[in-house]
Image (tube, rainbow, N blue to C red):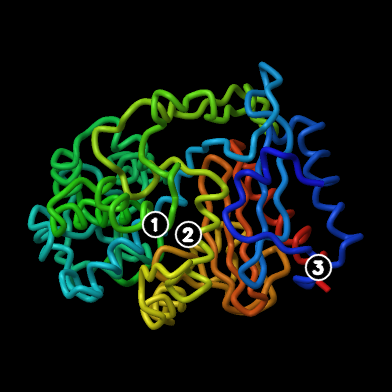
């Protein structure tokens, strides 16, 4: 079933799927469905890895690295993981918390004084320049950055205030360096009172710059020294190396839903700052090792990254009844979820548009990448694809169903 190049790239010890609790004659349904997505031009290509009980149960490639050239997808393909950068940066910040150099409940201004005194756009205002603002009832904290309750956003909404915010982490880090980005944010009002509303945001980009301020080095270097290298994530970085460009996956020329032309930012071009919200490059194998470390309670192969209690804190739901979840419920695959630190957290087996287990946690990238961890099932799944656009929400729900239907 597995190609020779896949066997060479195994991130965890291999075991027979049946020994890990999979129904062997149900596993082919996964390949059949994903190959059908490739055949209907809804997916250019993908790498899928599934681990259970600390062993690799499934490792397959589908479609093309470069659809235009017809190049087959290799297991070690490089992908822009977009917002799957966020959990990596969250773990980096939690390392500093464990060392007493950062604290989750501290105001962000303790680390980035540039953001001191940010005011708030009142609900009745459009947020245009010159409109009145109000004082924050409390300051935004490191936790707010991690759980998207700081009052920040991306520039993706109807009000004028959204048009004043960068559209994405990629857009921000392509336009400004870190100091310029912070100055831009400091000149804007927050969308909401900190802690009152969940809205997907630039918070992890701010967190990455807070890490840089505390650690005294670029985010990419800090994560490489403290997380990537210790875990053997040898292909994870913030720019595709020049000598590895041939492994960088391409997207389809047109969005399979809208039919419009689509492009991804060239991952070989450095950003102006290491954006913690969406700038990393990785492989399925590397990210599987990261996710397995979280499932193991902060340790992998004798390397301890975080304490067991810190990981438990990270993957717990941090959204209480005081937080408005209307924006979270706009996402079809996290409807009914809560949110931990850097990851969505399943509140019950129902809702969410797909089968899963209470306590499952995950996150994804706008480029089409996705991972989830189900502690109750001792299950880790990593899906790497360059399939942006609305189709990615369908693929996330499809994958949950395909993987879980194969469990005994």
Kind of element beneath mark 2 = helix
Residue 88, numbered label: 1
Q: Position of residue 237 (x, y in %)?
A: 38, 42
**Is the residue 78 above or below the residue 55 in the image?**
above
Residue shown at 18%/73% (left/top)?
106
Residue contact between numbered discs 2 and 1, judged by CB atoms under 8 Å: yes
| Residue 137 visible in this rendered orientation of the protein | no
Whole-Å distance between the Cαs marked 2 and 3? Answer: 23 Å
Looking at marks 1 and 3 on the same chain, the residue that comes earlier in the sequence is marked by 3
Looking at marks 2 and 3 on the same chain, the residue that comes earlier in the sequence is marked by 3
Crowding near the residue tagged with mark 1, few <14, some 14–19, many ≥20 C-alpha atoms within 10 Å: many
Q: Nearer the viewer, residue 226 or 189?
A: 226
Q: Which is closer to the viewer, label 1 or label 3? A: 3
Disc 2 marks which residue? 290
Q: Nearer the viewer, residue 130 or 84?
A: 84
Residue shown at 72%/46% (left/top)?
60
Whole-Å distance between the Cαs marked 1 and 3? Answer: 29 Å
Q: Nearer the viewer, residue 112 or 129?
A: 112
Crowding near the residue tagged with mark 3, few <14, some 14–19, many ≥20 C-alpha atoms within 10 Å: many
Disc 3 marks which residue? 22
Looking at marks 2 and 1 on the same chain, the residue that comes earlier in the sequence is marked by 1
Q: How many marks?
A: 3
Kind of element beneath mark 3 = loop
Q: Quadrant of residue 62?
A: top right
Q: Nearer the viewer, residue 66 or 182?
A: 66
Kind of element beneath mark 1 = helix
**Is the residue 248 above or below the residue 310 in the image?**
above
**Furthest residue in direction right, as rendered:** 25
């Amino acid at each position: 079933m597995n190609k020779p190049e896949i066997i060479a790239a195994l991130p965890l010890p291999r075991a027979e799927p049946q020994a890990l609790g999979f129904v062997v004659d149900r596993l082919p349904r996964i390949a059949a469905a994903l190959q059908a997505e490739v055949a209907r031009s809804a997916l250019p290509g993908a790498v899928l890895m599934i681990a259970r009980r600390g062993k690799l149960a499934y490792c397959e490639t589908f479609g093309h690295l470069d659809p235009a050239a017809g190049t087959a997808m290799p297991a070690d393909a490089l992908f822009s993981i977009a917002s799957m950068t966020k959990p990596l940066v969250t773990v980096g910040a939690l390392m500093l918390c464990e060392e007493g150099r950062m604290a989750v409940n501290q105001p962000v201004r303790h680390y980035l004084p540039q953001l001191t005194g940010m005011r708030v756009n009142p609900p009745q205002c459009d947020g245009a320049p010159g409109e009145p603002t109000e004082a924050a009832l409390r300051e935004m904290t490191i936790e707010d950055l991690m759980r998207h309750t700081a009052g920040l956003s991306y520039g993706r909404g109807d009000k004028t205030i959204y048009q004043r915010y960068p559209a994405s982490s990629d857009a921000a880090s392509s336009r400004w360096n870190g100091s310029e980005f912070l100055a831009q944010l400091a000149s804007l009002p927050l969308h909401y009172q900190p802690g009152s509303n969940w809205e997907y945001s630039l918070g992890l980009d701010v967190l990455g710059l807070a890490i840089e301020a505390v650690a005294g080095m670029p985010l990419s270097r800090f994560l490489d020294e403290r997380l990537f290298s210790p875990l053997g994530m040898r292909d994870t970085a913030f720019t595709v190396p020049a000598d590895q460009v041939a492994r960088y996956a391409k997207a389809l020329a047109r969005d399979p839903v809208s039919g419009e032309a689509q492009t991804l930012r060239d991952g070989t071009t450095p950003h102006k700052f290491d954006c913690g919200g969406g700038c990393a490059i990785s492989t399925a194998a590397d990210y599987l090792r990261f996710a397995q470390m979280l499932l193991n309670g902060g340790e992998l192969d004798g390397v301890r990254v975080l304490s067991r209690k810190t990981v438990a804190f990270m993957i717990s739901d941090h959204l209480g009844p005081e937080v408005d979840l209307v924006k979270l419920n706009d996402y079809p695959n996290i409807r009914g979820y809560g949110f931990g630190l850097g990851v969505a957290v399943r509140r019950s087996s129902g809702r969410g548009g797909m089968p899963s287990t209470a306590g499952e946690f995950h996150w994804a990238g706008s480029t089409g990448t996705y991972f989830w961890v189900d502690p109750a099932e001792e299950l880790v799944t990593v899906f790497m694809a360059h399939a942006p656009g609305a189709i990615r929400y369908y693929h996330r729900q499809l994958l949950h169903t395909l993987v879980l239907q194969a469990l005994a």
